[in-house]
Image: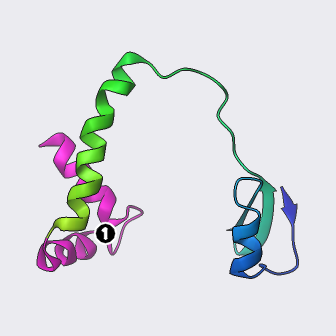
Amino acid sequence: MAIIKEMPGRKIIDGFKGKLDFYYYMGVPVCRKWPRSQGKSQTPASIAQWPMFTYVAQSWITISPFVREAYYSIAADCGLHAKDWFTRGYITG
């Protein structure tokens, strides 16, 4: 990780996509080598869950604004995003 003076523009960031990762760490702009997979294969149980997460991700886009706003209000005072609450609700029933 390298501390940088200021966050570069969107075109520069997009130009380094797949090579460098720009983000803020505790309010400080930083840059690091793009994260890579360790090469470990996924377990069969993990692979079996992919369709469920795909369905939830696609459903988030199609839910009504009224329902989406309810999830945003739930997530207002906690560390989870509204989409995280939606996913958790779908998975746990």
Residue 77 placement (x, y as % from top left): 35, 73
Q: Label 1's element?
A: helix
Q: Quadrant of the N terminus?
A: bottom right
Instruction: Locate residue 52, reporting x and y percent.
Output: 24, 39
The answer, for residue 25, to whether it is visible in the render is no
- Quadrant placement of the C terminus: top left
- Which span of residues is magenta-colored? 64-93
In the image, farthest residue toward the top: 44
Q: Which residue is found at the position 30% from the left and 31% from the top?
A: 49
User: Is 81 one of the magenta-colored residues?
Assistant: yes
Measuring 80% from the left and 62% from the top, which residue is drawn there?
31
Direction from residue 70 to residue 85 in the image, left or right? right
Rendered position, 42 above or below 13:
above
At a point 38% along the width and 17% down the height, the residue shown is 44
Quarter of the image for residue 82 reads bottom left
- Side of 69 relative to 6 (left or right): left
Residue 12 visible, this orientation: yes
Residue 76, percent across and down?
33, 75
Side of 66 relative to 34 (left or right): left
Density class for disc 1 (Cα within 10 Å; few <14, some 14-19, many ≥20) is some
Q: Read off the residue under disc 1.
A: 75
Q: Say if the magenta span includes residue 63.
A: no
Q: Where is 65 relative to 80, above or below?
A: below
What predominant SS class does the magenta segment belong to? helix
Rendered residue at 64%/34% (across/down): 37
Q: In the depicted view, which residue is nearer to us: 33 or 92?
A: 33
The percent coordinates of residue 29 (x first, y second) are 77, 73
Three-letter code, disc 1: Ala
